[in-house]
Amino acid sequence: MSHASRAADFLKDDARTDWHNKSLWHVRSKRDALIQHIPEWEAIRQLGSDIKDNVLSNLDVYLEQFEARAKANGVIVHWAADAAEHNEIVHSILEKHKVDRIVKSKSMLTEECHLNPYLEERGIEVIDTDLGERIIQMKNEPPSHIVMPAIHLKKEEIGQLFHEQLNTEKGASDPQYLTEAARQHLREKFLAAKAAITGVNFGIAETGGVVVCTNEGNADMGVHLAPVQIHCMGIEKLIPRAEHLAVFTRLLGRSATGQPITVYTSHHHRPKPGGEMHVVIVDNGRTEQLGREDFRNSLKCIRCGACMNTCPIYRRSGGHSYDHTIPGPIGSILSPGKDLKKHKDLPFASTLCGSCSDVCPVKIDIHEQLYKWRQIVSSEGHMETSKKLPLAGAGNVLSRGGLYNFMGKAARTALKLAPRAMVYNRFNAWGKSRELPEVPEESFKEWYAKNRKENQN
C-alpha cells in the first residue's frame, strides 16, 4: 500500500483525524509559546546545528575518542555494522548472563533494528516500560510518533486494552487510574528483569558517557535495578564535549513537548558496583547517508518530533501511514535512503510548506531534502506512470507560452460546460475530497495585460 492509501484508511474516521490533528498542533503551540520567552532561541538553534556539523565532519575521530574514554571507565563497547549485527550482539550479552527477562526504555534505534521480535523468538521476554511504548506493545503495533508513540489512541481505547490485559475496570478511562494500573503492572517487571536496555539521546566523546532523557524515569528504574545495562546508540548521537549538552537539552524538551527540559536527564559513565555496562554503537546505513552530500544534514536529527507536530500531512494521516520506524517529514528523508523503491512515495507526502524546517531545533533543511528526493525518484525511474505522464504533459505545456495560453482557455471553457460527472470521477484524485475553485472569466495574464493597457491610457 502507498502512503496515500494508508492515509485514506486513517481519514475514514473523521473524529479521530480531527482529534489527532488538534492534539499535535497543541504540542506545537506549547513549543511556540515557550520559545517566545527565549530571545536567544535562534542563536541556540544555530549553535546546535554548528556543533552537529562539526560532529558529522569529524565523526571518525569522535567515535574513537568516545570508545577510548568509555573503555577507560570500565564500559564494554561493541560495534554493529547493521541491524542484524546489533541484534546478535545484544542477544550474545543476554545469553552470556543467562537472561530471560529484560526491561527496555523507549529506543527508536531498537525499533529500527526490530530487536523485540528477534529476542522474543529466542525465548527472552521483552517489556517496553515507557507507558506509550508499553501500550502499543500490548496492541502489537509499531509506534506512530517518535516521542508520543501512542498519540493515535484515545483514552477509551487504552481503557479497553487495559481491561483485557491488566484486568482493570471495564469502561474505565480516567488517565490517572489507567496510569496507576500500568505502574503496578510494570513494577513487577522491573523487579523480575535481569537486564535493562535503553536508547541514547547523546553520547559524549570527551567523557565516554551516555545521556538518556525521559519524562517517566523508566530508564533509570531499569538500569538501577538490573545488574546488566545495555545502551544502544546510533553513530550520529555523539556530541564533542560535556559543555555542549546544555545546548541540546534546552533544544530537545522545548521542541519535543513544549516543556523547558525533560524530567529526567540521566548520565551513565561506568557500570554500577558488581554490574556490567555495555554500549552498542550502530551504523545501519548512517555512514551511507553521511556520504550523500544533499542528505547528510538529516543525521543532525535529535529525534524531538517537532517536524511531525507541525506537518499538516502527518497530523492528518497518522504515523502508521508512513510504514517506517521514523514517520513524518524526517522519516520521509531517512526511509528512501534505506530502500528507495519501497519508500518512493514518502518524499511526496509533503506540501513543501517549510514548516518542518522552521521548527527543527538543529536547522535541518527538511523540505529542501524532500524536494531533492523527489528529483531522485524521478531520475532513477521510480515514478509511477500515473504521475509520470501528467507531469511530462505539464512540463511540455508550461515550457511553451502559446500552448500554455491555449490550454488555459480550453480548460476554463471545458470546466464551465462539462457535466459534474466528467470532472469529479475516479481519475480526479484532487476532487475526491475537494471542490475545484470557481472558474474565472479570464486568466491573470489576460487581466494584467488589459488593466496595464487601461492604466497607460
Image (cartoon, helix red, strand yellow):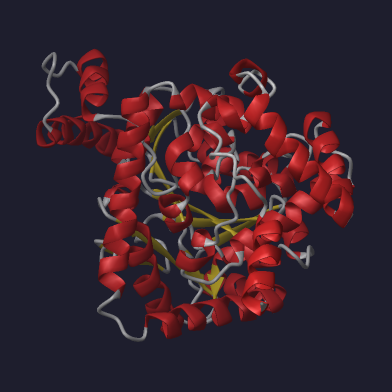
Left or right? Give the position of 321 relative to 404.
left
Question: Closest to the observer: 167 or 232?
Answer: 167
Provide residue 83's location: percent of width, then percent of height. 66, 43
Quadrant location of the N terminus? top right
Quadrant location of the C terminus? bottom right
Provide residue 60's location: percent of width, then percent of height. 71, 73
Left or right? Give the position of 451 relative to 247.
right
Provide residue 39's location: percent of width, then percent of height. 32, 85
Dividing the picture into quarters, in which one does residue 3 lie?
top right
Question: Closest to the observer: 251 or 221?
Answer: 251
Residue at the spot x=80%, y=50% of the render? 405
Question: Closest to the observer: 231 or 442?
Answer: 442
Left or right? Give the position of 324 relative to 449.
left
Residue at the spot x=59%, y=40% of the render? 439
Q: Is residue 143 in view? A: no
Residue at the spot x=80%, y=53% of the render? 375
Q: Is residue 29 above or below residue 191?
A: below
Q: Is residue 43 above or below residue 67?
A: below
